[in-house]
Image (cartoon, helix red, strand yellow):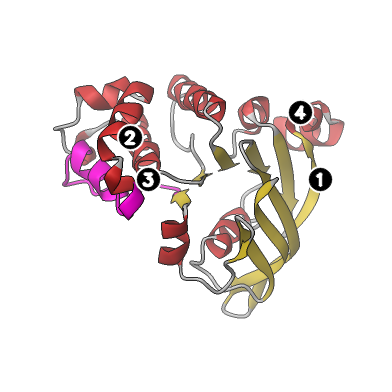
Amino acid sequence: MNLLEINDLASGYEGVQILWGVNLRLEKGKLTTLVGSNGVGKTTLLSTAMGLLRPWQGNVTFAGQDVTHLSAHARAQAGMVLVPEGRQLFTEMTVYENLEMGAFSRRSQATFKQNLEKVFDLFPRLKERFRQKAGTLSGGEQQMVAVARGLMAEPEVLILDELSLGLSPLLALTLFESLTRLKKTGLTMLLVEQNVSMALAVSDYAYVLAEGRVHLEGPARDLLKNDEVRRTYLGI
């Protein structure tokens, strides 16, 4: 069963078309990754899927319902949650307060304590620093807060934009390990990531975006072995 479907999507900014007829499917309970070079339209695709940008053509279906014309807020309430590139934390607020901001929906408020324990179990470091201002944390810790805040919303699908951007290899590995743990819980995820080898290694299915179009798709492990992907994105 596909939880999220993007059909024949075209989109852009101020008359400049970025996406051309993109089709993408997220199978329920699976981790799907979207890779591609800078400037090919990955963030544009996420913005359009989340309702932050209006599509020029095509539609977005979530849990069997057409959400193309719903606001970003309505999509978030329905269970589509984005962890944005650059974290976008409330830096003057504590870790705990940032996590509180994630639990905005009625259903997530009802399970706040349980979800808090889950994210502290996933990221023990945040439990140690829950009274600390988010702006004083390291880059890796801030990314943990961003992911944890997304999880506090109790998402049906968690969309992560550039999870490892700017992080050391060790911290990136820690975050990718957390994705593997989340995948075992049955959470549906879409990962947009420039660390292609690591993203493909942890994902079930993958899409390669090039010049605003889906260039390749298939099981992630198959794409990891694909000569074109290895040559273009892995340099081997």
Of callouts 2 and 3, which one flags the residue occurring earlier in the amino acid sequence?
A: 3
Q: CA distance from mark 2 to mark 3?
A: 20 Å
Location of residue 25 with respect to 198 vertically, above or below: below
Q: CA distance from mark 2 to mark 1?
A: 36 Å
Of callouts 2 and 4, which one flags the residue occurring earlier in the amino acid sequence?
A: 2
Residue for point 68% across, 30% down? 200
Find the magenta span and give its range.
Answer: 83-107
Disc 3 target residue: 87
Graded by Cα atoms within 10 Å as few (under 14), some (14 to 19) or many (20 or more), the crowding at tag 1 reads some
Q: Is residue 15 left or right of residue 208?
A: left
Q: Is residue 5 visible?
A: yes
Q: CA distance from mark 1 to mark 3?
A: 28 Å
Q: Secondary structure at mark 4?
A: helix
Of callouts 1 and 3, which one flags the residue occurring earlier in the amino acid sequence?
A: 3
Disc 2 target residue: 115
- Which three-letter amino acid code belongs to the residue tagged 4? Leu
Q: Is residue 165 magenta?
A: no
| Image location of residue 211, percent across then percent down | 74, 58
> Mark on residue 216?
1
Location of residue 84 with respect to 139 vertically, above or below: below
Q: Secondary structure at mark 2?
A: helix
Disc 4 target residue: 224
Graded by Cα atoms within 10 Å as few (under 14), some (14 to 19) or many (20 or more), the crowding at tag 2 reads many
Q: Are marks 2 and 1 in contact (CB under 8 Å)?
A: no
Q: Secondary structure at mark 3?
A: loop
